[in-house]
Amino acid sequence: MEITETLNSSGCAVSLWHSDRDQLETMVDYSRDYPDEVDQAGSLYELDEFPKSRYVLETGQTAVIQHDDLGEEDSELALMNESEMFTLVISPLIAKDQVIGIVELYEEVKPRIFSTEEINLVESLSSQAAISIRNSKLYEEAQHEISVRKKAEKELKKLLKEIKESHEELSTLYKISSIINESISMEALLPGVLKA
């Protein structure tokens, strides 16, 4: 991924926030050093287990965790140790002033202190990614809406055809009914006219 290459880091993950379910969903996870040991797209994580990620999502502020931070929550440090991460930068994905997920940039080789300029670059690239993700979602929604409208239009045309056919059948039945009524009326009137 571009952010990994640009900042010469070990890897990066992008996750979307499902605030209604209080979960993060991994969209992509990339590791230069261990490409086979990444999360699968679609993996879900409960935010209750990751308070620093929740903090980033709720505040929109970037956070940095070092593997030996004493003040951090056990669950996030345990994940870092399990994944052999030394440094984790969590940056919000913000589009239209709304946090939609996070970008996690990590170091697996050795601890790293990211400079202010590097953090600013992470945030800038995260913003660009957020805009791309939002535009992609809007495009998908528009395509879905077009599909739904085309289906509704097709159903409407089918219904109009059925109504037209029904109208033609009713019109034919009305004509037959009129002819029968005229013949019944003539037969009923004919004896009375003959008696007169």
Image (spheres, helix red, strand yellow):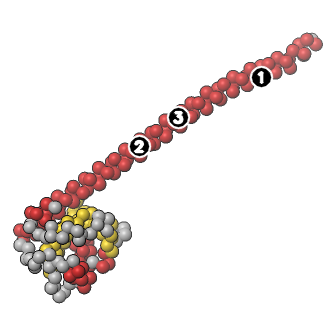
Query: Can you tell which of label 2 and label 1 is closer to the viewer?
Result: 2
Left or right, residue 191 beside residue 121: right
Q: What residue type is labelled 1?
A: Asn
Spatial distance from mark 2 to mark 1, Cα to Cα?
46 Å
Q: Nearest the camera: 180 or 90? A: 90
Q: Which residue was labeled with disc 1?
A: 181
Upstream in sequence: badge 2 or badge 1: 2
- Residue 167 image offset from top left, x and y in percent: 61, 30
Q: What residue type is labelled 2?
A: Arg
Q: Which residue was labeled with disc 3?
A: 160
- Asked whether the viewer can see residue 140, the reply is yes
Quadrant of the rendered image containing residue 123 = bottom left
Q: Do the residues labelled 3 and 1 touch (CB within 8 Å)?
A: no
Q: Which residue was labeled with disc 2?
A: 149
Quadrant of the rendered image containing residue 39 = bottom left
Spatial distance from mark 3 to mark 1, Cα to Cα?
31 Å
- Residue 7 image offset from top left, x and y in percent: 9, 66
If the image is split into quadrants, where does the C terminus sit?
top right
